[in-house]
Image (cartoon, grey):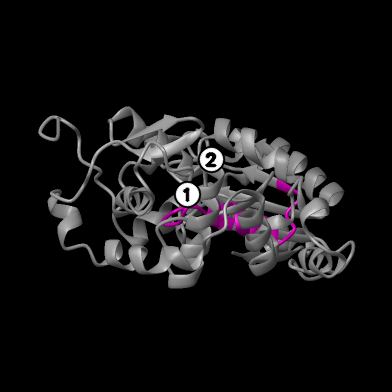
Amino acid sequence: MNAIRKQPVYHRQRLLLYFLECLPAKQTDKRRGLSDSDLQKLLLLYCKDVGSSHYDFVPWDYGGYSFQCAYDLNLLEKRGWIKRQDNKLILNQKIDNEHWAIESEERKMVRRWIPQYPWRGEELIAQTYRVHPYYALHSKMKGRLLNTEDLTRVDNSLGTVKNGEVILFTLGYEGIHFETYINKLISNRVAVLCDVRYNPFSQKFGFSSSMLLQVLPRLGIEYRHFPELGIVSKKRQSLHSKADYESLFDDYCDNLANRKAGLRKLRQVVESKRRVALTCFEANHQYCHRHCISDFFENNYHYQVEHL
């Protein structure tokens, strides 16, 4: 079986197996396996405690949640590394002889760490809320699991913003987790995400419009696509130097007059929703056309612009 089973490529996927390995394997042991919820909560606590960047989490219906983790668990199940039984995730076979597990320092770290958190179910959920109140922001259970003082900490976890302040944010998703990106929107109280990619599809997990449309509204953030403000793919094929980018953006700015309808529509969104973010791929806004759009609004309408 091992010879034909596809190996987990990423360290983050191996981490999930290390977690499940630490739990009782006997069929008669009631502690056997982990529910999806318990694994997500333990993983959140682990990543925060040890400073791991394997996964990030968003405040979801029942607390901190990683979409990437859920995807990886399904992948590991399809490949035969884990199975689901009685609503629990269970390691399907021993990993002692796998070359990537034998000398893994993280495997040793997980074994030392996991006994610190014996709670499961609602006790574990409540513990994550108390330690990391931000992740309880959208919880359906916080009113039942937390006391008044804890709930106040949840409400205050985002800080305050000036009412009515108009800010045009820009951000890219290059090099960061989907969940990290979403947290930037939440922490800056973004009301609408305006996607200025010509084609809102990405091979990077989470960043196609279909996923954004599925996730953002449940967090109180509206998603809108502005293809008329995008740059067609053929114009982005030969960008090898800073001069190439500058030439592309000079051409884009020179032809903004041809995009008046899109700019007008975007301005209406900003004036109405007040805290709006422009998004595209590049991490550095100077290498993305979104800075041309934000510069236009800053120069012509004196909007405050913040590049996240």
- Identified by mark 2, the residue type is Arg
- Tell me: residue 73, above or below residue 51: above
300 horizontally vs 294: left or right: right
At mark 2, the secondary structure is loop
Looking at the picture, tell me which residue is in the foreground, 277 or 159. 159
The numbered dot on residue 281 is 1
Label 2 belongs to which residue? 197
Q: Position of residue 251 (x, y in %)?
A: 49, 48
**Residue 271 inside the magenta-drawn segment:** no
Which residue type does callout 1 highlight? Phe
Mark 1 and mark 2 in contact? Answer it, CB < 8 Å.
yes
Crowd class of label 2 (few under 14; some 14 to 19; many from 20; radius 10 Å): many
Q: On the image, which quarter does residue 128 sit in?
A: bottom right
Residue at far front of view: 28
Expressed as whole percent of the image width and height from the top left, the position of residue 296 reads 67, 57
Could you say which is closer to the camera, residue 99 or residue 91?
Answer: 91
Numbered label tally: 2
Q: Which residue is rendered at x = 45% and y = 58% of the image?
A: 287
Snapshot quadrant of residue 161: bottom right
Residue shown at 63%/39% (left/top)? 215
Q: Which residues are magenta?
A: 171-192
State how far apart marks 1 and 2 are (Cα): 8 Å
Count neighbours of disc 1 (C-alpha within 10 A) and say few if under 14, some if 14 to 19, many if 20 or more. many
Q: Sequence order check: which comes first, mark 1 or mark 2? A: 2
The percent coordinates of residue 33 (x first, y second) are: 43, 43
